[in-house]
Image: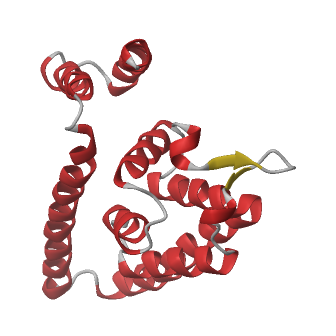
Amino acid sequence: MDMKSSKLRLNDEGMVQGSPESRVSVRELFWAFLLVGLSGFGGVLPFVRHMLVDKRRWLTPAEFTEVLGLSQLLPGPNVVNISIYVGARFAGAVGASAAFLGMMVAPIAIVLCLGAAYTRYGDLPAVANAFRGVASAAAGLVVAMAIKIAWPVLRSGRAIVSAALVVGAIVVIKLPLVWTLAIMAPVSVLWIWWKAP
């Protein structure tokens, strides 16, 4: 990610931190990610993007796509990695902790309550139908999110070719995801770096 475009800098402790003009408080980080955790339980990536890009404008669409790409390469859930990155960017280690806790507190409490309820009422037909409806909504969110994430990439011919090669490797050649990433990630980076002005 370009350091100038994303306004990143390192503080005295060596943590990534937002520039002074883009500073976000620890409290804002906690509440923003808490609300996302509550509103998008079960599939929060579309809600995270809406909050970060459309509502609060803490990231541009292109920056969000870059951060999502990075978070997918790292171990752990994507949205957790995004929350930690955004928290660290704007408020250092404390911001990363606040964003992480905001993202996780509500879902953990909800999972515990739903687990107890499902254990007791999971055999009822109405509960099974409700889960089918939730699964359909989640599939729609995934498709909508894929379109929004792809939009900044579709403006670059090289990025389109790279994406097509990855899809071809996975869908047509049936290459495992790990091998596809191991081959295509360095090739894509070198190709775009080599062609950069």
Q: Nearer the viewer, residue 181 or 56?
A: 56
The structure residue drawn at horizontal position 49% and vertical position 45%, both measured from the top left corner, is 71
In the image, taking residue 177 as reference, residue 158 lies left or right, namely left
Q: What colour scheme governs how the chains and residues are painted in the rendered image of this protein? A: secondary structure
Q: Residue visible at 54% across and 52% down?
A: 81
Please state the horizontal and vertical placement of residue 36, each as a whole percent of the image: 43, 76
Of residues 122 and 191, the one nearer the viewer is 191
Percent position (x, y) of residue 156? 24, 31
Tell me how many marks there are.
Answer: 0
The image quadrant that residue 96 belongs to is bottom right
In this view, the residue farthest toward the right is 12
Residue at 31% across / 64% down in the picture? 46
* Apparent side of residue 49 relative to residue 2 in the rendered image (left or right): left
Q: Is residue 161 above or below residue 36?
A: above
Q: Quadrant of the C terminus?
A: top left
Task: Check the image and report above or below for 139 versus 104.
Answer: above
Q: Position of residue 118 (x, y in %)?
A: 35, 81
Residue at image coords 52%, 74% = 33
Percent x, y for residue 151? 21, 47
Quadrant of residue 25 within the rendered picture: bottom right
From the viewer's side, name the closer residue of 111 and 146.
146
Q: Quadrant of residue 52?
A: bottom left
Image height of 46 relative to 29, above or below: above
